[in-house]
Image: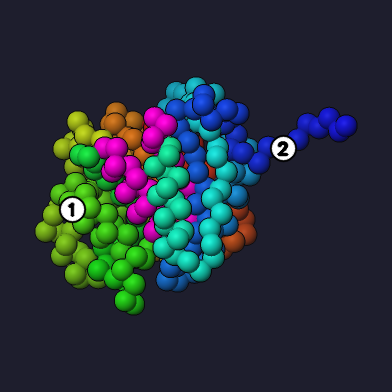
Amino acid sequence: MISGPFLSKNWMASVEDYADAQIVMLGLPFDGTCSYRPGSRFAPERLRLASWGLEEFSPDFCKDMNDVRFFDAGELEFPLGNTQASLDLIEKNVNEIYSDGKKFLGIGGEHLVTLPAFRACKNFFKDLCVVHFDAHTDLREDYLGEKNSHASVIRRIGEIAGFENIKQIGIRSGTKEEFDLMNEYSTLIHSFDGLDGFRDKKIFLTIDIDVLDPSIMPGTGTPEAGGLTYAQLREWLKYLANFDIVGADVVELAPDYDKSEVSTAVAAKVVRDVLMIL
């Protein structure tokens, strides 16, 4: 019998028993509606490997990963080419996570995976708000006739949650109609105090990794110049640590567009930061 040691395929410092966890990490390797550069389906596996290059202690949050009781459930297996069945599978599994009294952290995958996860979360938290980091509005009514698209995911979520319950950060690309909708509901914010109306509410946090500038995050499907630095995103997350976040995801890393693997390393650190505030 071989004795190892062996490198785990799970996220570093995850607990071995699902029952012991307060948070469940779920890989969502789906990019079936990607409108520009596909490849985010490969992110969850690569993020897990990159996590082993991180320290377990975060000086930014003064917290150790061993203090975060989370279970890495691995990746869902999707029926390729069947978007609706894939969305249904996500919603079913996220429902089960909340039924078990745990929080959800998704690692995608394209941004459409947020929609079924949010629907499941909304079943358990009726007055649920959304904090959305992204380069793009994602508020299209449809994209080339497809209503369920990563370009329309926040539009679909707004129809469920109410657009007044959404705040968006880092947005710098979209159609005139999308920006008109943001202006109508004042969803776009630029400073921490724009979040203060959510202080006593439950929050679903969704981070499209292209909110970061492509100079540090080229490994994404739709890079957009003029983005946040990692340090700026970290400060937003430190502020959100004082809010009641009940679910989250980090999406749209497409690792193969950055052969240096720096994008994957940065995204892995963002995931670690999110674990620290859940």
Evaluate whether residue 229 shows in this view.
no
11 is higher (above) or lower (below) than 141: above
- Judge left or right: residue 159 versus residue 75: left
Q: Residue 60 at what x, y percent from top left?
A: 43, 29
Name the residue: 45% across, 71% down.
Answer: 36
Magenta extent: 98-125
Q: Residue 76 at what x, y percent from top left?
A: 54, 50
- Judge left or right: residue 14 versus residue 158: right
Secondary structure, mark 2, is loop
Disc 1/disc 2 C-alpha distance (Å): 44 Å
Reply yes or no: does residue 2 show up in magenta.
no
Q: In the orientation shown, which residue stands out farthest toward the right?
A: 1
Q: Which of 103/36 is in front?
A: 103
Reply yes or no: does residue 119 show up in magenta.
yes
Q: How is the image coloured?
A: rainbow
Total numbered circles: 2
Residue 163 got which mark?
Answer: 1
* Residue type highlighted by circle 2: Leu
* Residue type highlighted by circle 1: Phe
Which residue is the site of mark 2? 7
Name the residue: 22% across, 40% down.
Answer: 126
118 is higher (above) or lower (below) than 235: below
234 is higher (above) or lower (below) than 150: above
Q: Residue 87 at what x, y percent from top left?
A: 42, 57
